Amino acid sequence: MQQNFKRFLFIMLGLCAFALGLKQLREPDIWWQLLSGRWMIEHGAITRTDMFSYTMQGHKWVNVKWLYEVVAAGLEKAGGPEVVLLLQALVNLAIVYLLYRATKLLAEKLNTQIPVFASALSLLLFLAIVEYRMAGRPEMMSHLFCTIFIFLIWRNPTFDWKKAWLFIPLQCLWANMHEAYPVGMVIIGACAGGSLVSYILTKEKTALQQTIRTALLFLACGLIILCNPNTIQLWKQPFEIYRQVWANKYTTELFSIKDPEYWTIEAKWYITLLVLSILYWVIKIAAVVKQKQVRSFFTPVITSYLILLPLFAYLSITANRNIPFAMIVLLPSVAVMLVWLVNILRIQNIGLFQKITKQALPIAIVITGLFYVSIVSNKFYKYTNSPNRYGMHVSMLHNPTGAADFIKEHHIQGTPFSDYFVSSYLLWKLYPSFKSYIDLRDLDVFPVEFFDDYFNIYTQPEKFDTLDSKYNFNYVVVSTSQLLALQMKLFWGKGYNMVYVDPVAAIFLKSNAINEHLNNNRAIQKTFSWPAPVEEQGWAQTITKLLNPFVNYDEEDGSLQAMYAARYYNAMKDYPVSIQQLLPQMPALEDNAEANYTMGATFMQYGNALKPGPDKQRKLDSASIFIQRAKELDPNIVPNEQE
């Protein structure tokens, strides 16, 4: 019976890992990566210069991810873009399995027994903390390679050549899959350093021999990196990435521990586990020194691991996106630390704990089952304030699907001005008739000065006129949440006409002879549009419903169209249209906190824009009513500054 419980528990853990990969497709980077892979397959060549933007056409492009992109595009050709999420789910499974094996191997080295409950709990904590980066990004390959490296180290602690040679082809693959390949070199380098420190502490001849082997392996892995289309450039790439980290001020992924934005709920959980694990190792080492067991304890593999922990901890506190790498290295320690924590706090002597221990497996199954339900029901994502949602589905509320369809249907041609976020999907959908002004390939293609000029438009929309004179834009397509000052300029000014807007993107056509037939066609210009549902792949729909038969995408059914419309027109300061869109729908949305807050915010801003008088007061009174209603429905809905 116990064996059946254990087997079922690990099946449930696997389902949790798998389900966390089956997210709605919302990451904009995915689209240009699929296009890049498609281009390479069609042309039988590797991307070396930019061909997707008109601003950097022919500019050198060091595309480190080329092999991943080819693989992803090949899979997409067979199963659609959702296949990227299936790949993420399978990678999650592999990572969890390898980390479980690595944890058992560490416990053997420490002569410690880890109960199944502790192993399961540590893996659940791992999944909960790293979920935010499990979204179909190519870095999934770096997470996988990092896990494989850690597992192979514990599996072959002496670095016997018969098995150690595997690191060399793995490092080669890694260097062609994702730019985090230097992490592999860090791991091997730490093992060489750990073996040397072990020799210094123990004077064991085998430790010295292992130092030589790992040092040679480090050199071999460094040389194998040259087996890539960019050859020696990849030796320089780590320094280029380091430069980009400081130059790219436009991504939230690079927040360090000093930034308030770093402290997400996942970061808080991670730092807690990190501190407790470090405390465990400090106390463990102190006990080893006190008991004069240095020679037996500081083996090369243990010493190497103790070097890896602070190295990856440092990486994790310098950039939020590095937390998953640190958690991969930390995870084997977490299970051991949990057992130590129980012992140090003498919890095992408590009667209730002893009773619970007897039912540990069923309790672990229940906890894992609840975690699984929270994933597929989206309660976990909502609790952690994650933008992710369950289900292999192209989200039309995160991708400019409607704008792309409108451009294609009405054959809009010419040079577009497209913002940083919408460009990737438009490239995937419309290339080669569409090329971007700027896109998410970032500093790999676009110089820092170009980035700075682009982002200056956020606060200085008049700079757009200079760009328009230079490039002669025929239309503008922008995210409804970005470049609001520019959108205000285009919305109210002369020279452009807004022909399309939906929850994700707006399209402004230049007022010229080429576009006259569209600018004068009022039949196609709606106050606010709702994109058509994206056709789902049958296999993706089947797998999604298999894990949750009740899955739905209610937020995309159009019931909140009026709220999205009001938000947009409120941002454009066209308050009468905003009220006209939402107010008639409020009886149906009276229990929706967001709708009430949107209505209240619109009345408040409208009232504040009016001169003193009865009309102003009526608007402000209406604002108070709706905002109070929103607060009753959701106390956290109103920003602090409006309290």
Image (tube, rainbow, N blue to C red):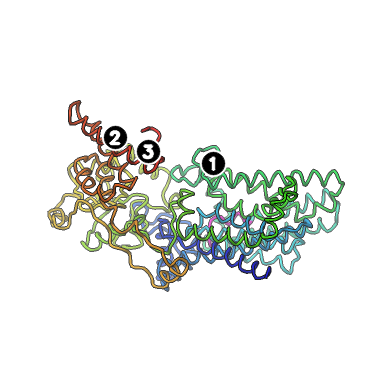
The answer to whether residue 336 of the structure is visible from this angle is yes
Q: Earlier in the sequence, mark 2 or mark 3?
A: 2
Q: Left or right: 101 with respect to 598? A: right
Tag 1 secondary structure: loop
**Relative to 387, 559 lies left or right:** left
Q: Secondary structure at mark 3?
A: loop
Q: Residues within 10 Å of mark 1 (few under 14, many from 20)?
A: some
Q: Residues within 10 Å of mark 3 (few under 14, many from 20)?
A: some
Amino acid type of the residue that numbered disc 2 sits on in the rendered structure = Ser
Which secondary structure lies at badge 2? helix
Mark 1: amino acid: Ser
* 552 to 55, vertically: above or below: below
The residues colored magenta run 176-184
Give the class, few, some or many, for how many residues have Cα within 10 Å of label 2's Cα (few <14, many ≥20).
Answer: some
The reply to whether the C-beta atoms of the residues labelled 2 and 3 are less than 8 Å apart is no
User: Is 627 on the left or on the right of 246, as rendered?
Assistant: left
Mark 1 = which residue?
A: 256
Disc 3 marks a residue whose amino acid type is Val
Which residue is under mark 3?
Answer: 638
Query: Magenta stretch: dominant SS?
Result: loop
Q: Position of residue 435 (x, y in %)?
A: 32, 57
Residue drawn 30% across and 46% down? 595
Q: Quadrant of the N terminus?
A: bottom right
In this figure, which residue is indicated by the disc labeled 2? 624
- Residue drawn where x is 76% and y is 44% of the image: 283
Residue 63 visible, this orientation: no
Measure the C-alpha gap from mark 2 to mark 1: 39 Å
Q: How many marks?
A: 3
Q: Is residue 82 a member of the stretch shown in magenta?
A: no
Q: Nearer the viewer, residue 520 or 1?
A: 1
Task: Name the image quarter holding residue 97.
Answer: bottom right
